[in-house]
Amino acid sequence: MQTFVFAVVVLSVACLAESRRDRPVGGLGRTKNATPEIQQLVDSVQDEIIGQLPLGYDREQTLQLHAVTYREQVVAGKNYFIKVETGFGRYLHVRIYKDLSGNASVSSVQLQKSLADPIEYF
């Protein structure tokens, strides 16, 4: 029986280590392709994103905000760092905070990004 309990504990620790291998505690996870859920998150705060853009930033046209890739950070809720295509080869990096109740808000927007720019903490 002791051997069985020991094996379960070792397997549990190994699984926990495997699940955290791509993300240090409190750090950013690996870059992933955007999912429909991430696009829905971007859509839910689209007006906030557009509101943080400078006045000359394609506001004469309706921007199509298309989530491309993202990284997550677990905090008291989650920070989502998302690469967003706005059209014409232009990209933004957007940080969206989603609290434990599910409320989302835009924390920051970075302009003049390219598809090749890595998503880093900002």
Image (spheres, rainbow, N blue to C red):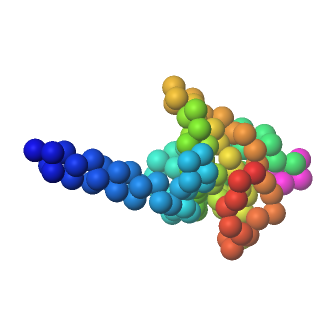
Q: In the image, 88: left or right of 77?
A: right
57 shown above or below 108: below
Work out whether residue 109 can be spotted: yes
Work out whether residue 87 can be spotted: no
Viewport quadrant of the N terminus:
top left
User: Magenta stretch?
Assistant: 55-59
Q: How many labels does the image show?
A: 0
x%, y% of residue 50?
75, 44
Residue found farthest to the front: 2
- Residue drawn at (84%, 54%) of the image: 57
Judging depth in this view, the residue of 91 and 33 nearest the camera is 33
Residue found farthest to the top: 101
Residue found farthest to the bottom: 116
- Per the picture, the main secondary structure of the magenta-coloured stretch is loop
Q: In the image, 11: left or right of 91?
A: left
- Residue drawn at (68%, 67%) of the image: 118
Judging depth in this view, the residue of 55 and 52 nearest the camera is 52
x%, y% of residue 101?
51, 26
Judging depth in this view, the residue of 75 and 13 nearest the camera is 13
Residue found farthest to the left: 1
118 shown above or below 5: below
- Residue drawn at (63%, 38%) of the image: 97
Q: In the image, 82: left or right of 53?
A: left
x%, y% of residue 107?
72, 40
- Residue drawn at (71%, 69%) of the image: 117
Q: In which quarter of the image is residue 17?
A: bottom left
Q: In which quarter of the image is residue 74?
A: top right
x%, y% of residue 10?
29, 53
